[in-house]
């Protein structure tokens, strides 16, 4: 793959993450990887180098998609004995290994949905920012299956993600209120909880999150609104925040007849000291054990 192809892939990954969240992006990426392996036409000698090259690209996305990287690293290690078993056998084994990891990740995400559901209580007024699929599904499950009465305060973000959440809650008649993110101060006195998700939990105690999450967490922390961070265990990174390759972009924007030069980062980060409850698919995790 050429460098320009890599640079095309990285913004595509960021777009998926912004629109769907890291967990769904990881699922889509694994399914796409399996499909690519099955469709790949190459010689037996080319198979391993092509996979290793793709793995290298996945490792270097901006930001790093930690759950996907963990899966790819495990896959690469498990594939080593099978690369010289013939092309058909190698492709079959690659599909088998990736399929198994896909099922495991789906199971972890479903379990995290249940854990998230358990933290929704009768009468709650829950602020939500950077929600991923399991938070959205937890709201639906708590309302439709457990018949809990609560309200969700949605802080408007990316159009596609906001539309996805609003459409889902509306379809299942979950009570919600949609406001601009900057109007949160008007609702802090009645807020019971803030639910957020993360791209990564770093080794130095930071959560890489969607844009704007750091500001929301800070104001909720100041007003003593409990912050709940939900993330699968596979999102825990062995590396520190500077190694997460958060994308920095210098760009120009036009408003009226004026050009603004803007520096923007693709993601925020939140210090775990501002998080009251860190929850994985195994339940609530002691904060000191997560660092």
Image (cartoon, rainbow, N blue to C red):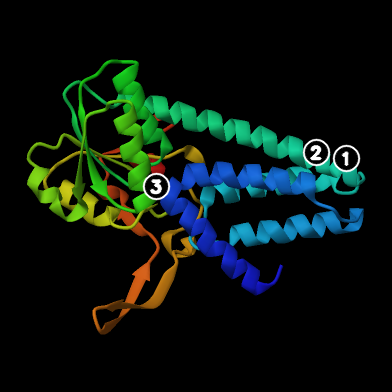
- x, y (%) of residue 42? 87, 56
- The residues tagged by marks 3 and 2 sit, at their Cα atoms, a distance apart of 32 Å
Around disc 2, counting alpha carbons within 10 Å, would you say few (fewer than 14), some (14 to 19), or many (20 or more)? some
The residue at the far top in this view is 146
Q: Residue at x 52, y 53 (%)?
A: 65
Q: Quadrant of the N terminus?
A: bottom right
Q: Is residue 282 visible?
A: no
The one of 155 and 212 positioned closer to us in this rendering: 155
Residue marked by disc 3 = 198
Residue 93, which numbered label?
Answer: 2
Which dot marks residue 89?
A: 1
Quarter occupied by residue 135: top left
Residue 56 is labelled as none
Q: Position of residue 267 (x, y in %)?
A: 38, 59
What whole-number distance in Å separates the C-alpha atoms at marks 2 and 1? 6 Å
Could one spot residue 106 in this view of the protein?
yes
The structure residue drawn at horizontal position 64% and vertical position 36%, both measured from the top left corner, is: 101
Q: Is residue 16 above or below residue 266?
A: above
Q: Are marks 2 and 1 in contact (CB under 8 Å)?
A: yes
Please provide percent x and percent y for residue 33: 68, 47
The local secondary structure at tag 3 comes to loop
Element on which disc 2 rests: helix
Looking at the image, is mark 1 or mark 3 earlier in the sequence? Answer: 1
């Amino acid at each position: 793959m050429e460098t320009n192809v890599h640079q095309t892939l990285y913004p595509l990954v960021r777009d998926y993450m912004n629109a769907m969240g890291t967990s769904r992006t990881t699922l889509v990426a694994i399914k796409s990887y399996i499909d690519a392996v099955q469709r790949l036409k190459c010689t037996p000698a080319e198979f391993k180098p092509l996979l290793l090259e793709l793995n290298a690209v996945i490792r270097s996305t901006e930001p790093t998609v930690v759950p996907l990287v963990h899966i790819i690293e495990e896959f690469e290690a498990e594939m080593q004995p099978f690369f010289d078993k013939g092309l058909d056998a190698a492709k079959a084994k690659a599909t088998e290994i990736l399929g198994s990891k896909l099922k495991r990740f789906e199971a972890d995400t479903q379990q995290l949905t249940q854990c998230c559901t358990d933290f929704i209580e009768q009468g709650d007024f829950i602020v939500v920012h950077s929600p991923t699929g399991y938070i959205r599904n937890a709201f639906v499950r708590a309302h439709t299956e457990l018949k809990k009465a609560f309200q969700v305060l949605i802080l408007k973000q990316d159009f596609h993600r906001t539309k996805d959440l609003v459409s889902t809650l509306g379809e299942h008649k979950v009570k919600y209120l949609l406001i601009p993110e900057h109007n949160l101060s008007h609702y802090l006195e009645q807020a019971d909880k803030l639910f957020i998700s993360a791209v990564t939990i770093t080794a130095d105690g930071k959560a890489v999150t969607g844009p704007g999450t750091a500001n929301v967490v800070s104001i909720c922390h100041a007003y003593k609104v409990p912050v709940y961070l939900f993330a699968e265990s596979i999102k825990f990174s062995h590396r520190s925040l500077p190694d997460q390759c958060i994308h920095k972009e210098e760009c120009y924007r036009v408003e009226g007849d004026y050009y603004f030069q803007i520096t923007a980062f693709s993601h925020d980060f939140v210090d775990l000291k501002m998080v009251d409850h860190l929850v994985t698919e195994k339940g609530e995790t002691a904060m000191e054990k997560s660092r």
